[in-house]
Image (tube, rainbow, N blue to C red):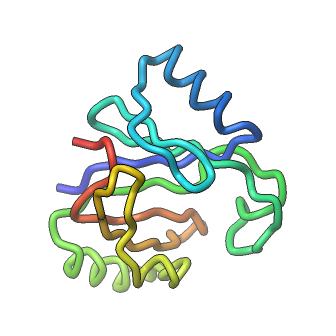
Amino acid sequence: MARIKHIALRADDPEKTATFYKEVFGLEEVGKARTGFYLSDGYLNIAILSKLETAHGETPRDVEGYTGIDHFGILVDDMDETCKKLENAGAEAAVPAVNTATQTNTDGKSYFELKYKGPDGQIFDISAEGWVGGA
């Protein structure tokens, strides 16, 4: 069964936004991203990232100054099987540079994710290992 385990938000001030979620909802800071923070409730990872300074035009959300949800992640049992299902459904690979590399978080743990675009252009990740802070 697939599970949503990761959501990324773009924010004007990532530190202020992270502080809000920590204080209001009791989320724990579990790591730092290059452009923000990773928070978790122990089950779901939320990345709070800085807004884009330069538009890349990849999706409708990829514009200068955008704030809000950037992408979300789904934990899957089998990467190969899921990739086949995504390709059969017409999903496009997104951000190819990320697709070829294992990511390492500030806590030294590694994970592998693939980014795809859904039919509406929404970016999402899939991973069999999960994300920092997620159960």
Spot occupied by residue 40 in the image (x, y as percentages of width and height): 38, 34
* Image quadrant in which you'd find residue 27: top left
Q: Is the N terminus in the top left, top right, bottom left or bottom right quadrant?
A: bottom left
Taking depth in this image into account, of 85 and 93 the one nearest to the observer is 93
Q: Give me the residue at 39% from left, 73% from top.
A: 114
Q: Give me the residue at 82% from left, 66% from top.
A: 54
Exactly how many numbered labels are in the figure?
0
Spot occupied by residue 92 in the image (x, y as percentages of width and height): 49, 82
Q: Give me the residue at 83% from left, 59% from top.
A: 64
Left or right position of 117 against 77 = right
Spot occupied by residue 102 in the image (x, y as percentages of width and height): 35, 74
Left or right position of 4 against 65 = left
Q: Is the C terminus in the top left, top right, bottom left or bottom right quadrant?
A: top left
Image position of 52 with respect to 10: above or below: below
Spot occupied by residue 128 in the image (x, y as percentages of width and height): 22, 64
